[in-house]
Amino acid sequence: MGSGPVTFGGNGRFYVLSAPAHQAYPTRLITLAEARRVEMGARETANERVIIQFLHPEVCQSCQLLMGYTQFAEGSVWNTMPAHLHDRRMEAYLYFQLPENQRVFHLMGEPSQTRHIVMANEEAVISPPWSIHAGAGTASYTFCWAMAGDNVDFTDMDMVAMEDLR
């Protein structure tokens, strides 16, 4: 809110996220060294991963946008298990660093009636608040995640028991 024009430069790729803001906060660069790092999962359950949080209340102020990325250890392929949903915000995933001949099976839908979408490298998917979001890849990968809604509490989620997934 109120930050003015945005310009991009360089040879990289850009992933642009935006959400309405009700208050102006300072705009600043957040480096990898400043990001919040959370190690989770285990090799035994094929979900050993590190979550890097850039837009997070412990890192910077934001009206309703949270953003970071999750990177899997070699041999780990399951993301966001056990599955959950965010009743108060939506979430978007951008899958990347996935070899060209590999795929991620992204799970979504109501817990009692899930569906999957087959995702390739550099493809994105939006998950509405009523939908679970999880996935499994045919190889290790990374995904950028972003959430927007009426709060920035990263842990505000409703977990879904494995036996409730259909």
Image (cartoon, grey):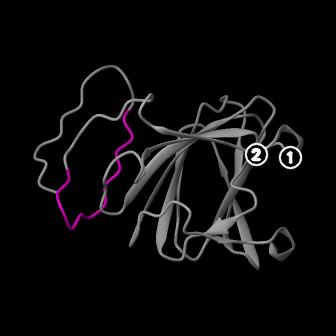
Label 2 crowd (10 A; few <14 / some 14-19 / many >=20) = some
Q: Position of residue 139 (x, y in %)?
A: 76, 34
Q: Which of 75 and 40 is in front in this view?
A: 40
Image quadrant containing the C terminus: bottom right
Identify which amino acid the numbered label 1 is placed on. Thr
Q: Decide if residue 106 is in sight here.
A: no
Q: Position of residue 113 (x, y in %)?
A: 74, 77
Determine whether, in the image, residue 129 is placed left or right of residue 162.
left
Is residue 21 inside the magenta stretch? Answer: yes
Identify which amino acid the numbered label 2 is placed on. Gly
Is residue 81 inside the magenta stretch? Answer: no
Circles 1 and 2: CB distance less than 8 Å?
yes
Rendered residue at 29%/20% (across/down): 10
Magenta region: which residues? 14-25
Q: Decide if residue 90 is in sight here.
A: yes
Q: Where is residue 56 in the image (x, y as percent from the top left)?
A: 42, 51
Can you identify the residue that label 2 sits on?
41
In this rendering, the answer to whether 54 lies above or below 93 is above
At mark 2, the secondary structure is: loop
At mark 1, the secondary structure is: helix
Can you identify the residue that label 1 sits on?
45
